[in-house]
Image: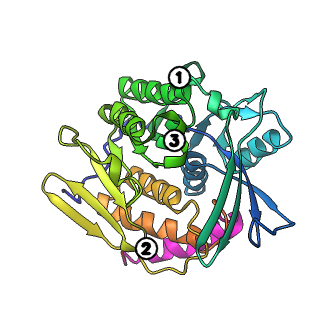
């Protein structure tokens, strides 16, 4: 693996630097077990949207492609994303409900339950993917979770990846395998096929260990960059010439929700800034580490920016 590889994205005049396709849900967080909790704090979360928000906070121009239900939560979520700098023109309010997940975290152990079947975002289809928006970005981020929520959302993901290739857009893909989501869609075999269908259009593969290991087979004919996220063990850059381990910095973990999504944002941001792959991975570890210290999929905005100021001071000294 050539750890000096950098993202070769030209097109300096493109309107956006990162666009993603996916679902964002309402997050309802409890301070005690969901079995006994009487109070819930509302927020939002979704893998590709989490990455967009973090990337926007890091200075990238971002846009989200989705469908947002016009239930009592939808308008507020879109406004919150706009405040973060995420363009939502391709994430319109439509008839329907938004997915909801309930979460409780204690001692880094997460308790989840979801209500997302039939959500507005699960109705996403190829007709919702604006070609002009895909053509106007430098990087497209796609996800296995978007593929999993419905057959038409899977088709939309593939269509977006095809458009990206046609318009010379760099494609990053996080397989994000969730067995429960794929259970009604054909299980592991269906997830593997979904992964295989977008690989020919993928430049940067972002699996997590061990969850995505079952999908990382038959990659011999694929020649992109693979960065395997391994939590506290760091990340592995995989290539034909072998593996390179990039260690993570020690961090106190409050909640690991969204850490991989923040890592993706840091990595893409670092590569777009012209950092080498190994430098960008180190930067991504540090960005993910910020989120690990706070509860929820997305850390508070003010605290994140304050942590970033400290991070920039570290980076300025070249202490990778």
Element type at mark 1 = helix
Badge 2 density bin: few <14, some 14–19, many ≥20, Cα 10 Å? few
* Earlier-in-chain disc, 3 versus 1: 1
Mark 3 to mark 1: distance in Å? 34 Å
- Please report the bounds of the magenta region as a residue range: 298-319
Q: Which mark is residue 316?
A: 2
**Residue lying farthest to the top in this orientation:** 127
| Side of 91 relative to 35 (left or right) | left
Name the residue located 78 percent from the left edge and 44 percent from the top edge.
Answer: 79
**Residue 94: quadrant of the picture:** top right
Q: Is residue 15 magenta?
A: no
Location of residue 178 in the rendering, given as x and y in whole percent from the top left corner: 50, 49
Q: Tell me: residue 228, above or below residue 46.
A: below
Nearest-to-viewer mark from 3 and 2: 3
Q: Nearer the viewer, residue 181 or 62?
A: 181
Residue at point 83%, 37% (across, down): 71
Mark number displayed over residue 132: 1
Q: In this orientation, does residue 16 appear?
A: no
């Amino acid at each position: 693996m050539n750890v000096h590889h950098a993202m070769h994205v030209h097109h300096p005049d493109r309107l956006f630097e990162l666009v993603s396709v996916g679902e964002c849900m309402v997050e309802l967080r409890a301070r005690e077990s969901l079995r006994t909790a009487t109070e819930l704090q509302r927020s939002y979360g979704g893998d590709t949207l989490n990455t967009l928000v973090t990337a926007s906070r890091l200075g990238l121009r971002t846009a989200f492609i989705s469908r947002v239900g016009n239930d009592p939560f939808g308008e507020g979520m879109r406004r919150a994303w706009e405040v973060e700098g995420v363009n939502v023109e391709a994430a319109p309010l439509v008839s329907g409900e938004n997915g909801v997940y309930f979460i409780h975290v204690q001692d880094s152990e997460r308790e989840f339950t979801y209500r997302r079947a039939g959500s507005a975002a699960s109705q996403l289809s190829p007709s919702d993917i604006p070609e002009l928006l895909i053509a106007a970005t430098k990087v497209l981020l796609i996800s296995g979770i978007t593929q999993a929520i419905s057959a038409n959302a899977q088709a939309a993901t593939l269509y977006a990846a095809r458009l990206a290739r046609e318009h010379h857009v760099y494609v990053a893909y996080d397989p994000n395998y969730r067995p429960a989501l794929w259970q009604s869609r054909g299980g592991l075999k269906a997830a593997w096929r979904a992964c295989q269908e977008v690989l020919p259009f993928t430049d940067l593969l972002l699996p997590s260990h061990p969850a995505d290991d079952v999908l990382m087979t038959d990659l011999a004919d694929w020649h992109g960059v693979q960065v395997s996220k391994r939590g506290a063990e760091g990340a592995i850059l995989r290539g034909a010439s072998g593996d390179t381990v990039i260690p993570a910095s020690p961090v106190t973990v409050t909640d690991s929700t969204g850490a991989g999504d923040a890592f993706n944002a840091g990595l893409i941001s670092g590569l777009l800034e012209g950092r080498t792959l190994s430098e960008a991975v180190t930067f991504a570890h540090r960005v993910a580490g910020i989120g690990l210290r706070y509860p929820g999929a997305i850390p508070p905005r003010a605290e994140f920016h304050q942590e970033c100021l400290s991070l920039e001071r570290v980076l300025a000294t070249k202490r990778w």
